[in-house]
Image (cartoon, rainbow, N blue to C red):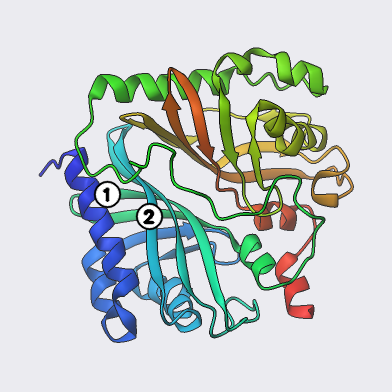
Amino acid sequence: MQFTVLQNKTHVKALMDEIADAGPGNLRDALVNAYHPGAHWRGSHPLNEVDGVPAIEKTVWQPLMQAFPDLERRDSLVIGGSYRNRDYVGMVGHYAGTFARNWIDIPATGGSIYLRYGEVHRLDGNRIIESTVLIDVLDLIRQAGIRLLPASLGSDEMWPGPISADGCLLVENDEEESAVSLKLCLTMQKTLDNTLVQRDDLLNMSQKKYWHPKMMWYGPGGIGTARGLQGFVDCHQRPFRIAFPKRYIGDNHYLQIGDGKFAATAGWPSVMTTHAGDGWLGQAATGRKINMRVMDFYLCDEGLVRENWVPIDIIDILLQMGVDIMEQVRQK
């Protein structure tokens, strides 16, 4: 049976809310209801990849619920669409809760936290067959009071929802508008000339035609949030390009969807590169080959890209560079 985009979005949001609200006694039933028996779950280090409902329960959900017993899910974006004849629902938001017990060796604070996520769920009928979940573990480490890296160049903050206040798109959206939004974001991505590093060159390359004057770029822990093209260049783009001057971004996206004024792309990995320059997150160049797990969620406004939420598995990148953040947390 073929479901509409609206049906998929509404269904997946309900499934994820049911899991988050299930509690230990009802967790297995909620997971069985949501996931295909052979489902694949992949996410941020140190969770990484598991298969099947029992492994998803043991690796992902049981530890999360034990650590945050009053866990509450808060979605900011819920969008959907099809790519390569597969149905997807993409989500951005955060879990709120009391950090009551240690989670993945991060020490509990006893206080309130927000744990942000970017998610992409692929559907097989009315069940999830694959979930890709980038949880900002590094930002939670910051909230736990542990500083292992230099301060972010951008601001460390909870990501807001879209300025349009309509990110949970539980409506059918115009297919033409959806296609225009996706095309705008893909076109902007193609303008990112990988050879440019100097600040003036980055500010004046073709990307400036596609970013809104009041753009917001919401980056992960370690990088932070930036305002305007200058903020984006200074806080993320230029330091990143100095560290990774040769990047390959190929046809390896598993997701490219538009939904009304929103769009999303994602890859596992999205970027293949070499760590050839100094300074990014305080690290000296290692010369190592690096793969990056990245998602991009966009809001388009006035024919331009207004907001960009960017979950990145920073801890996995650092691990490939020889920096084991989780081991450092355990030592702390």
Residue lying at 52% horizontally and 64% vertically, measured from the top left: 115
Please determine whether, in this image, residue 321 is positioned above or below residue 69: above
N-term-proximal mark, 2 vs 1? 2
User: Which three-letter amino acid code belongs to the residue tagged 2?
Assistant: Asp
User: Which three-letter amino acid code belongs to the residue tagged 1?
Assistant: Leu
Instruction: Report which residue position mark 1 lands on.
Output: 123
**248 horizontally vs 304: left or right:** right
Residue lying at 64% horizontally and 29% vertically, measured from the top left: 228
Q: Which corner quadrant holds the C terminus?
A: bottom right
Asked which secondary structure carries label 2, the reply is strand
Residue lying at 43% horizontally and 35% vertically, measured from the top left: 264
Residue 133, given in percent of the width and then of the height, sits at: 46, 56
Q: Is residue 12 visible?
A: yes
Please determine whether, in this image, residue 220 is positioned above or below residue 201: below
Q: Which corner quadrant holds the N terminus?
A: top left
Residue lying at 27% horizontally and 55% vertically, measured from the top left: 13
Instruction: Report which residue position mark 2 lands on.
Output: 75
**305 horizontally vs 194: left or right:** left
